[in-house]
Image (tube, rainbow, N blue to C red):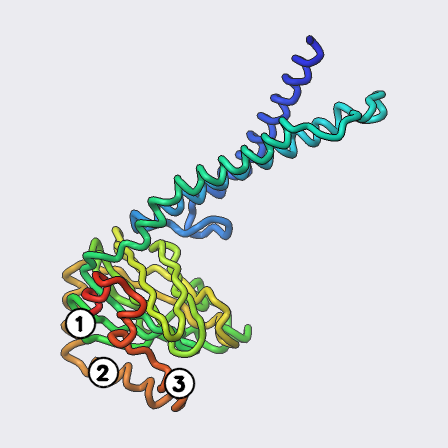
Amino acid sequence: MLAVKRNITKWFTVFSGGILVAWSFTLPVLANDLNTRYNLREPVTALAKDLYFMHYVLLAICLIIFVGVFGVMFYSMYAHRKSKGHQPADFSDNHTVELLWTLIPFLVVVGIGIYATPAVMAQKDTSNADLTIKVTGYQWKWGYEYLKGEGEGINFLSTLTTPYEQRINIAPKTNDYLLEVDNPLVVPVNQKVRVVITANDVIHAWSVPALGVKQDSIPGFVRDSWFKAEKTGTYVGQCSELCGKDHAFMPIAVEVVTAEEYSEWVGSKLRGDSSAEISSLSNNESTDNKSTQIDVAGIEAATLSTSQQEEVK
């Protein structure tokens, strides 16, 4: 009995030590420095904060499982090695163990599903938006069209502005390498923005980690997501689906401004020829591409709920 207690104590010591060592390496990552290579960007929406916290919770669960399983395995190999005179156990079945290693993972997965469900449901709730914007992925740029709310009627293209010399390593790279665009998406702070996402040619993905948004844009389909930024600033992302040779060169930039600055921006865009920027697309696209452009109103009925259709209209 004493030997069993000693073995349990040793196992617990190894297990606890493993967790402490692993956690000590994890703490610098959790510092969430915007300059780090190993952590997510600072979240600026309530949903993004929930997703990020969920990410850390799942990492902790994985860490505990990893340390527990491998701790037992390595301890068993060390404490019961042949050089100490241990003989292999002679048994073929253990129904209790088989039941446990089936039931415990099942309960872990169910628990994770229950924990994640509210956040997943919240991602799908695009109702009562203050602003609705259509996002269209092209090879290889983004098109934005303000459908509803202040700024309705504004549309433009957003393309990469990083000099070609930097891309071929002739000129030194800047801190914003491959993230600079000519026309960022401009939205007001503390307002719910619904993004209606589609594509003109192949599958793209509109992803801005700080806003908690990542949604595929698929030709012939309308998908939607939303965000409500709580902090002004410029937040960047990139296309997250392999879409062709310039996949790496179609960044996303969302500029979150105050309500006053947004109204001023809207006024300046509407006073100018706002259709000139988007109309240039038709001069650059081939006839085949033009025939595949998405008419949101035409396919809403097949892809969105009734309440969502009313918002797009």
| 112 or 161: nearer the viewer | 112
Nearest to viewer (mark 2 / mark 1): 1
| 59 or 103: nearer the viewer | 103
Tell me the quarter of the picture where residue 7 sits. Answer: top right
The kind of secondary structure element at disc 2 is helix
Nearest to viewer (mark 2 / mark 3): 3
Residue 24 in the figure: left or right of residue 203:
right
- Marks 2 and 3, how far apart in space? 19 Å
Q: Which residue is mark 1?
A: 152
> Is residue 24 in view?
no
Q: Amino acid at mark 1?
A: Glu
* Quarter of the rendering occupied by the N terminus: top right
Q: Are marks 3 and 1 in contact (CB under 8 Å)?
A: no
Q: Residue 301's spot in the image, x, y percent?
A: 27, 70
Q: Earlier in the sequence, mark 3 or mark 1?
A: 1
The kind of secondary structure element at disc 1 is loop
Q: Earlier in the sequence, mark 2 or mark 3?
A: 2
Q: Which residue is mark 3?
A: 289
> Is residue 303 in view?
yes
The answer to whether 156 is drawn above or below residue 286 in the figure is: above
- Marks 2 and 1, how far apart in space? 12 Å
Give the crowd class for mark 3: few <14, some 14-19, many >=20 residues within 10 Å: few
Q: Residue 154's spot in the image, x, y percent?
A: 21, 75
Q: Which residue is mark 2?
A: 275
| 296 or 98: nearer the viewer | 98
Give the crowd class for mark 1: few <14, some 14-19, many >=20 residues within 10 Å: some
- Numbered badge on residue 161: none
